[in-house]
Amino acid sequence: MPNVRNGFRARENQNQMSWELTFMRWADAWWSSSFLDRLTPWFTYLGSHFIVILIILLCWIVTHQRRVLRAFISLYAIELLVVYGLKYCIRRPRPFLFLEMASKLSKGPGEILDPSFPSSHVAFSFMMATFLARWFPRYRIIFFILAALIAWSRVYLCVHYPTDVVAGALLGYGITKIFLHYYSPFPAGPKQEKGG
């Protein structure tokens, strides 16, 4: 009986996400290339936990400001709670389970495949982009372009649905904006650059 229920649940999930799967099949046929297959699994790693922690440490090393360090760690903890709380409440299966395109993942450093919705890589990418854009507004376009490319890479690799990355981007951006509205480390930290 458990196998029957699991099979029914899988078919039900596939039906609910049919338009996204259709789009991803079309997109894969349009933009897939051997070069991107090799590059994208490494590029998408820029949204991983390891890179977030590395950037937090680099910010502290460069500024020597504990206020900045506390703010970044607190923001990261909030994002973790929200994103992974949603992941394990919704438990959306990964799209490659239906698309049979998991081979692209083997060409990069690999990753832990938890539930799909929302995308943690995208949430953390937009968290970092929003935080750094507030700190260095002159480079905000670069930060958000990188975050958007990481979001695209999640769909390209078939590890997330389009709505996963949209939700991740909104969470990463929205939570960070609210956090910085009520607790900004920058007045006591390094002098912010003026935007162009």
Image (tube, rainbow, N blue to C red):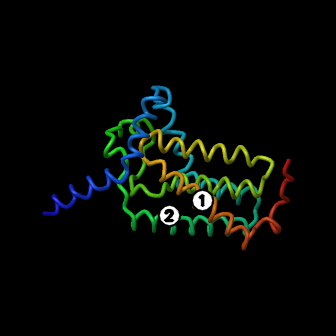
Distance between mark 1 and mark 2 Cα atoms: 9 Å
Between 182 and 188, the residue placed more toward the observer is 182
Between 195 and 18, the residue placed more toward the observer is 18
Q: Find residue 179 and report its horizontal and vertical position in percent.
A: 67, 69
For label 1, the residue is: 172
Q: Are marks 1 and 2 in contact (CB under 8 Å)?
A: no
Q: Find residue 88 and report its horizontal and vertical position in percent.
A: 39, 65
Disc sitting over residue 84 in the figure: none
Quadrant including the N terminus:
bottom left
Give, as a three-letter code, the residue at label 1. Gly
- Residue sitting farthest toward the top: 34
**Residue at horizontal 83 percent and vertical 58 percent from the top:** 192
Q: Splitting the image into 4 quarters, where does residue 158 fall?
A: top left
Q: Earlier in the sequence, mark 1 or mark 2?
A: 2
**Residue at horizontal 48 percent and vertical 53 percent from the top:** 164
**Is residue 173 depicted above or below 85 in this figure?**
above
Secondary element at image label 2: helix
Q: Splitting the image into 4 quarters, where does residue 115 fall?
A: bottom left
Between 38 and 21, the residue placed more toward the observer is 21
